[in-house]
Amino acid sequence: MLINPSFLDVSVVEVDGKSVQFNVGDRVEPYGSPLTITLPSKATKGKTIDVEIKVATTEKCTALQWMTPAQTSNKKHPYMFSQCQAIHARSVFPCQDTPDVKSTFSFALRSPLPVLASGLPTGASDYQPPKKDGESGTMKYTFEQKVPMTVYLFAIASGDLACASIGPRSTVWSGPEELLACQRELDGEIEPFMKALESIVSPTYQWGQYNVLILPPSFPYGGMENPVWTYATPSIISGDKQNVDVIAHELSHSWSGNLVSAASWEHFWLNEGWTTYLERRIAAAIHGEAHRHFSAIIGWKALEQSIENYGADHPYTKLVLDLKGQDPDDAFSSIPYEKGFHALYQFELLLGKSKWDSFIPHYFDTFKFKSVDSYDFKSCLLEFFDKDAECKKKLEEFDWDKLFYAPGYPVKPEFDQTMVKSCYELADKWQALVAASSVSSTSSTFKPQASDIDGWVSNQSVVFLERLQSFASTFSPENVHTLGATYGYDKTQNIEVLSRYLNIGLMAKAKETYAPAAELLGKIGRMKFVRPMFRLLNEADRELAVKTFEANREFYHPICRQMVEKDLFGEEGK
Ligand SMILES: [Zn+2]
């Protein structure tokens, strides 16, 4: 019997209550060290054996972040949380760490502080007093996950946590000091998302509760769809409910990813493409169709950045990947999200919305509690429309090989431009202004004023700033200053806006943005912001980039630390 732990100390293995021989082999990157267990007698097919492994995590564990009191917001207690996707669960416990395997779970976790895990809570019991004076006693916190789930969804967190209600089946958890702001941001938001989703997919929500844990700022992702508790970055708490689309995304994962899971990381688009598609359907249901298109336009820009980053013929720009011997974290980008979205959206356009909508619940009902690959998706779609001559013909003529294996861009559909028009127009004026200020003989009549962006939602500033990024290197430092000061981008609390403004400054080599960029990199560990900003800071001022990384090395989550290290110092790290 062979399983794959990573950086674990295995001390005892028992099979059916008896100690047995085991061997931990040499480490193979990125998989870990194979644990071979010798069974005392041949196991017959269909017979269940009981295997118990005594194990301790080590300092090298890549899934757990242990924070000192000083690293938390109120600086009173230690804090720990896990992030197991993609292949880090094996550094917490030995397991078959592939999304192709699903299992139910019971958890019993002991801590002096409140504990959350990816199951429904069944209570806290069995208080044990402290062993020494000055230490705290512990409680045993128990959880049940009766819906079969893959191990990358295993999650745990413990710290000085408080909770508040945000809906009939939802609570938000955070540090006590942040709780009120978190509750205000999310109160009443979940249930409309849930209703919108349940009218598109099937079956109804299966996980009992939908709670949100707002993590400390070093959390490396926007959100992680751990069942029962979504883990989310504090950067969504912006005070204006403008970034709660992250929650719409994570909630959608309750179906795409958690209920129906991609069988391997090579088919990751089935998780993220479907989820991005559903997240945008929620936007359409709640705010109107123009918002769905607006979100897709923002997504297209993210797709462009990822494809430019890898190069348009890079194998990681394919929808279906070949990850043999490779770490799935290295292939992580916007591509499975956005190219995946377009894979599904093009079927909506090809078949017509009402026919496509009749397929969506069928797909989720067919594969609930299972893991699927791209070929399962294809055959499910073909079978569903087998008796519909018109759709059948369209699907037979469809170029599936191109969809699955062609690198680079998908076909770009026509987007509704309602919400981006004013953003593009203002960007054009800026382009003329920047061009004029670099050539002294010409002049631009455009004078930027705060009222240029009156009535915009903050994501319109995001689109405007991304448009400016295409010619940001031609900005003079004065142009950058005017941009920040006129529209308040240099002082905004909304990190989506602030980070894009600072990135323009770095591209333009405007020195006034270097220190604020370095400061932001010490306040947030979300990779979406950290990685591009480090790359740009490195190009603008390598010494400051390296210094900033070294100063914040312990602040970053191990996954983020490893990625930035590769970005700054190359494949081998430092
Ligand atoms: Zn996702």
Image (tube, rainbow, N blue to C red):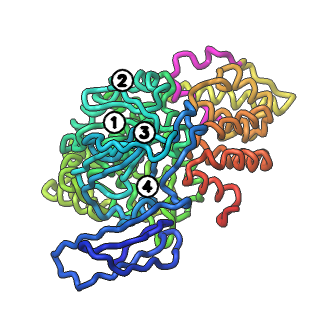
Which residue in the structure is indicated by mark 1? Answer: 211
Pointer 1 with pointer 2, Cβ within 8 A: no
Residue 528 locus on image (x, y percent): 55, 44
Q: Residue at x 32, y 44 (%)?
A: 141
Tell me the distance, in whole angstroms, between the alpha carbons under discs 2 and 4. Answer: 28 Å
Closer to the chain start, of discs 1 and 3, is 3
Secondary structure under the numbered disc 3 in the rendered image: loop
Q: Disc 2 beta carbon < 8 A from ligand 1? A: no
Which residue in the structure is indicated by mark 3? Answer: 113
Q: Magenta stretch: residue 458 in it?
A: yes
Q: Residue at x 30, y 64 (%)?
A: 101
Tell me the distance, in whole angstroms, between the alpha carbons under discs 2 and 3. Answer: 25 Å
Would you call the spot at circle 3 few (<14 residues within 10 Å), some (14-19), or many (20 or more)? Answer: some
Q: Residue at x 78, y 39 (%)?
A: 509
Tell me the distance, in whole angstroms, between the alpha carbons under discs 4 and 1. Answer: 19 Å
Which residue in the structure is indicated by mark 2? Answer: 187
**Residue 164 visible in the displayed image:** yes
Q: Residue at x 18, y 81 (%)?
A: 44
Viewer-nearest residue: 536 or 111? 111
Task: Locate residue 385 relative to residue 29 in the image: left or right.
Answer: left
* In the depicted structure, whether residue 535 falls above or below residue 280: below
Q: Amino acid at mark 3?
A: Leu
Between label 3 and label 4, give the one nearer the viewer.
3
Secondary structure under the numbered disc 4 in the rendered image: loop
Q: Which mark is residue 85?
A: 4
Task: Locate residue 354 relative to residue 570 in the image: left or right.
Answer: left
